[in-house]
Image (cartoon, grey):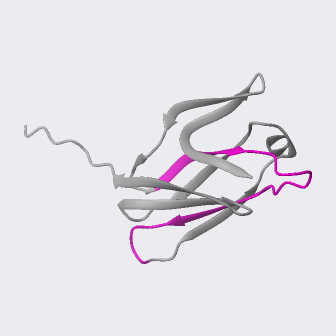
Amino acid sequence: MLTGAFLAEAAATVDNKLNVQGGVLSKFTVGPDRVARVVLVVLTLPDGEDSERRIDVEMKPPTLDATQHTSFEAPQAAVGEFPGFAFFPIETRLPFDGRWVIDVSCGDSVVSLPLVVDEWSPQSFGI
């Protein structure tokens, strides 16, 4: 069962513990290629002997355009202990500025993550 999720700049397992770098992301600035590289971190809770391991991700743009879908399979170790965690790299093109909604689901559990996206622009110093 999914108990939480967030986006981070980086994550790793260190001494069997989750080590997150860069904090939780709620805003992302894309470059001219509009590609975002983030890490999806999910927190899990064992839900019986046959816990669901498939993590579905749906990224909804701020426009009425089509959503982006992907899925991951959490390792057995991530769902077999309390608290469990898993993390997955996401590299995707975000073609629109504005508030995206990222729905992360596993079985009957859903977590919605807001992500405000804007494009980087060089600073003008008026010289």
Is 8 contained in the magenta span?
A: no
Q: Quadrant of the C terminus?
A: top left
User: Looking at the image, which residue sits at the far front?
Assistant: 48
In depth, the one of 119 and 20 nearer the eye is 20
Which residue is rendered at x = 54% and y = 40% of the image?
8
Q: Is residue 126 above or below residue 20?
A: below
* Residue 3 locus on image (x, y percent): 66, 48
Measuring from the top left, give residue 4's x and y in whole percent: 62, 47
User: Residue 13: percent from the left, percent from the top?
Assistant: 73, 30
Q: Which residue is situated farthest in the top direction here?
A: 15
Left or right? Give the position of 72 relative to 89: right
Nearer to me, 110 or 32? 110
Residue 64 occupies quadrant = bottom left
- Residue 100 falls in image quadrant: bottom left
* The residue stretch that appears in magenta: 35-64
Q: Position of residue 82 (x, y in %)?
A: 78, 37
